[in-house]
Image (cartoon, coloured by chain):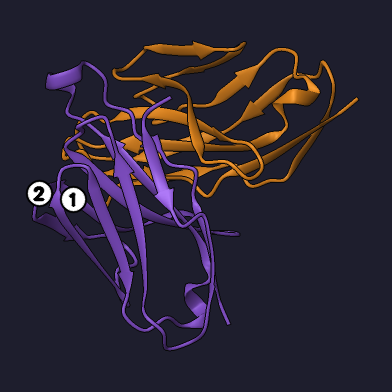
Chain colours: A purple, B orange
């Protein structure tokens, strides 16, 4: 299994509070992604990173920010959580085909976030 | 833009039945195509993949063929088992290393 961990695995918070989710990888992969998974929507990309300090927005980036100060860590922050951000959040990593000969994404175990 | 459309679920089958889950895609260039599986309470796991036209990906009795002429990558299995019950996601990766996922198809196999 790819070395990807997410913390916390479960969190309950209140509307208006800041929340930070952490993704940590031991694979030294260049690309990291944050998705949210909701019924009827599948996986939707929030933000992604293509290197240290290099990030870009995905499909549903409003209300979220990210940071990547080290190759192994990718943080997702909800500055002021809202009930619509209740979801399961998945981190994923991938590497370029040229480097590894393989191009699939590997997923972390997920974080279940509930905003009351 | 790039996108993936897959068969709506849920799908319920009896054990040993034949499974097909349809997936079509829209993309410029030559994307790589994937099927991922998600078991309850877990993250997604790669099931199989194909990186160029006419490639067939296969794993654990599942197969899918990259059909560029019909922009499809349908998942098939000849005889499903109860342990195959899960949610299946079709996905593509474009030339910019961006991934797009379908909405998922829930499969339940009953004994």
Q: Nearer the viewer, residue A83 or B71?
A: A83
Q: Which residue is mark 2?
A: A52
* Quarter the C terminus of chain A occupies: bottom right
* Mark 2 chain: A
Give x and y (percent) for residue B20.
Answer: 65, 26
Residue at mark 2 shares a chain with residue at mark 1:
yes
The residue at the point 43 percent across, 24 percent down is A1
* Disc 2 and disc 1 in contact, CB within 8 angstroms: yes
* Mark 1 chain: A
Question: Residue B52 lies in what quarter of the image?
Answer: top left
A73 is higher (above) or lower (below) than B65 = below
B80 is higher (above) or lower (below) than B38 = above
Q: Secondary structure at mark 1?
A: strand
Looking at the image, is mark 2 or mark 1 nearer the viewer? 2
In the drawing, does residue A39 fall left or right of residue A14?
A: right
Give x and y (percent) for residue A85.
Answer: 47, 73
The residue at the point 25 percent across, 53 percent down is A74
Question: Residue A2 lies in what quarter of the image?
Answer: top left
A78 is higher (above) or lower (below) than A109 = below
Q: Nearer the viewer, residue A77 or B18?
A: A77
In the drawing, does residue B73 fall left or right of residue A47?
A: right
Q: Secondary structure at mark 2?
A: loop
Marks 2 and 1, Cα distance to the nearest angstrom? 7 Å
Question: Residue A99 lies in what quarter of the image?
Answer: top left
Give x and y (percent) for residue B94.
Answer: 24, 37
Q: Which residue is mark 1?
A: A49
In the drawing, does residue B51 fall left or right of residue B21?
A: left
């Amino acid at each position: 299994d790819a070395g990807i961990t997410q913390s916390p695995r479960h969190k309950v918070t209140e509307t208006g509070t800041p929340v930070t989710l952490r993704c940590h990888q031991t694979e030294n992969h260049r690309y990291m992604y944050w998705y949210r998974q909701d019924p009827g929507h599948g996986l939707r990309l929030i933000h992604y990173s293509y290197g240290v300090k290099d990030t870009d927005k995905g499909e549903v980036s409003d209300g979220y920010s990210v940071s990547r100060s080290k190759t192994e860590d990718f943080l997702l922050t909800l500055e002021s959580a809202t009930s619509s951000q209740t979801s399961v959040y998945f981190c994923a990593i991938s590497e370029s085909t040229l480097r590894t000969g393989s191009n699939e994404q590997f997923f972390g175990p997920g974080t279940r976030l509930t905003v009351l | 833009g790039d996108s993936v459309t897959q068969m709506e679920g849920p799908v319920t089958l009896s054990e040993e039945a034949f499974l097909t889950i349809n997936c079509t895609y829209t993309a410029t260039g030559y994307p790589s195509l994937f099927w991922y599986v998600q078991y309850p309470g877990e993250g997604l796991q790669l099931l199989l993949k194909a990186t160029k036209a006419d490639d067939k990906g296969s794993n654990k009795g599942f197969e899918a063929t990259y059909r560029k002429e019909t922009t499809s990558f349908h998942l098939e299995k000849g005889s499903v088992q109860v342990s195959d019950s899960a949610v299946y996601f079709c996905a593509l990766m474009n030339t910019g290393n961006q991934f797009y996922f379908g909405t998922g198809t829930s499969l339940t196999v009953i004994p």
